Amino acid sequence: MEESKITFKSIDEYIMQFPPEVHEMLEALRRVIKESSPDAEEKISWQMPTFVLHENLVHFAAHKNHIGFYPGPSGIERFKDELSEYKSSKGAVQFPIGKSMPYELISRIVKFRAYENMKKAEEKLKKK
């Protein structure tokens, strides 16, 4: 028998599925991303909340024990020292549920990624 997969149509729909503690963390994270890159658009990509500014900016997702934040390899590399206390990989970092999130750091990462995406978009326009 095939397992049914939930398909989310919006970030609101995605966030609403979680218990209050996680719901609050996700809403706060969403707010920080919006404030840090007001021109970014929201969408669901790979069944995760995603912000797009010319191309993917950042994704985030709730897991059993952590909130995954996905700023891509450049975002992780640029802030690797400040992210060193968290479990991370080439393009992702895990913020444990139940501990305070480093919103100021997340804001700086989003701003850095927005700057990168704007520069890439400008370069593409120059080549045309």
Image (cartoon, rainbow, N blue to C red):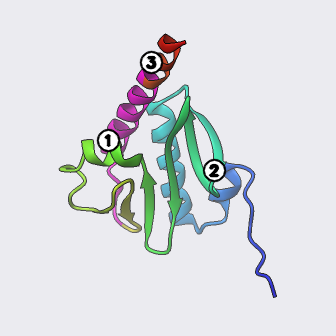
Instruction: Please name the predominant secondary structure of the magenta segment in the image.
Output: helix
Q: Which residue was labeled with disc 2?
A: 45
Mark 2 surroundings within 10 Å by alpha-carbon count, few (fewer than 14), some (14 through 19), many (20 or more): some
Q: Which residue was labeled with disc 1?
A: 104
Is label 2 or label 3 in front? 3
User: On the picture, is 53 further left or further right than 110?
Assistant: right
Against 50, is 38 above or below?
Answer: above
The magenta stretch spans residue 64? no
Q: Residue 32 location, x and y as percent?
A: 45, 40
Mark-to-mark CA distance, 1 and 3:
29 Å
Mark 3 surroundings within 10 Å by alpha-carbon count, few (fewer than 14), some (14 through 19), many (20 or more): few
Q: Which residues are magenta?
A: 99-119
The magenta stretch spans residue 115? yes
Question: Which residue does the image show at 34% across and 64% down from the upper left?
Answer: 99
**Which amino acid type is marked by label 3?**
Glu
Query: 59 or 125, which lies in front?
Result: 125
Q: Residue 119 location, x and y as percent?
A: 41, 22
Instruction: Examine the image and state in which quarter residue 107 appears.
Output: top left
Name the disc covering residue 123, or none. Answer: 3
**Which amino acid type is marked by label 1?**
Glu
Query: 83 or 101, which lies in front?
Result: 83
Name the quarter where the C terminus is drawn.
top right
Against 3, is 73 above or below?
Answer: above
